[in-house]
Image (cartoon, grey):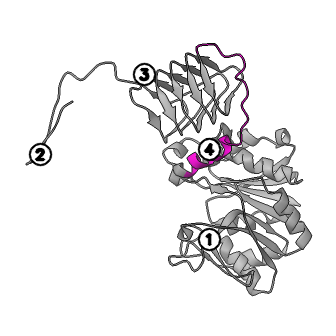
Amino acid sequence: MKGLILSGGKGTRLRPLTYTRAKQLVPIANKPVLFYGVEAIVAAGIRDIGVVVGDTREEIQAALGDGARFGARITYIEQDAPRGLAHAVLISEKYLRGEPFVMYLGDNVIADGITALVDDYRRIGCNSQILLAKVPNPSQFGVAELEAGRVVRLTEKPKEPKSDLALVGVYMFDDSIWDAVKSIQPSARQELEITDAIQWLVDHGKTVHPHLVSGWWKDTGKIEDMLEANRIILDTFTARGCDNLGADCRVEGKVVVEPGARLERASVRGPAVIGAGATVRDAFVGPYTAIGPDCLIDRCEIENSIVLEASRLERIPVRIADSLIGKNVRIHPGLERPRVHRFLVGDNSEIGLV
């Protein structure tokens, strides 16, 4: 069995962060989202993994390499433009044909990995297995309708969903998928939809097994989802690296202090992680915060946030919360108060100066 990870796409919902990096490499709990998918596939006993890449190929390839660090063998498959999930499958035929495979969307994170799901697929021997989860906003996902436990209809982002069962970003297929992806037509948004391909399998008598996900899963395409995934993963951590902190520091709960990080007159309340080489000085780091490597947190307070590597937060007078702060960012007070106010003010206005 092989793996296929989709790592193209432009990450428009995470802009401006994704103007300068692939969305799949934005870290959650100080680990790129994409790494969680690779590790989950390898843990399921799959070593040969194809990675579909687009404009950010060089960055993805630099991060994953040949896969040896994960115990995998990675092959890169180039997609000229985001043309839909089924198109990503179609262009991977040469690499995948002849073996069943698991397709994993590179910006998804799933609790407890996929080992049990892959074992389930192998045991059942069906043509395809899809993962489903109940969601409060099904119109934002591909949606499946079931009758007597069987998949009867799939619709991509329906305006009026007839089900609250969304497709989670993991799919399993055998060679019957090739006829499906070659038979469907582009959707209204000019993409080959994986929902249409799976519907083709259903309509042609193939067995599509639905598996309802009992644990959490996150599509990390939005900042709110990134922060929620960060909270969930940090909650699984065990405290470490806190043994040799000075008496002037206070650490509570699940706090990970990575090698080379320094705490000086700091208070950290977990779950939280302080990245390698980071410095937290005269500051408070609150729950559900991931401070990246080589960051400086100086005389400020922050909670429920992700700060990427080498960023500096200095002398911020109000608490920072619910934030995703990019790489090499510096946030600090201005050097001096403005000496001149200039206004262009409309009729019937009121301005209060503080």
Q: Tell me if 199 is positioned left or right of 138 in this view.
A: right
Q: Identify the magenta region.
A: 225-248
Few, some or many residues within 10 Å of mark 2 (<14, 14–19, 20+): few
- Position in image of residue 299 (x %, y %): 46, 21
Residue at horizontal 56 percent and vertical 23 percent from the top: 267
In which quadrant of the rendered image does the N terminus lie? bottom right
In this figure, which residue is indicated by the disc labeled 4? 230
- Residue 223 drawn above or below residue 205: above
Element marked by disc 3 = loop
Q: Count the numbered circles shown.
A: 4
Residue 330 lies within the magenta run: no
Q: Amino acid at mark 1?
A: Gly
- Position in image of residue 166 (x %, y %): 63, 69
Q: Tell me if 225 is positioned left or right of 277 in this view.
A: left
- Position in image of residue 138 (x %, y %): 56, 70
Q: CA distance from mark 1 to mark 4?
A: 24 Å
Residue at horizontal 67 percent and vertical 77 percent from the top: 196
Disc 4 to disc 2: CB gap under 8 Å:
no
Disc 1 to disc 4: CB gap under 8 Å:
no
Residue 142 — which label?
A: 1
In this figure, which residue is indicated by the disc labeled 2? 349
Disc with the residue nearer the chain's start (1 vs 2): 1
Disc with the residue nearer the chain's start (3 vs 4): 4
In this figure, which residue is indicated by the disc labeled 3? 315
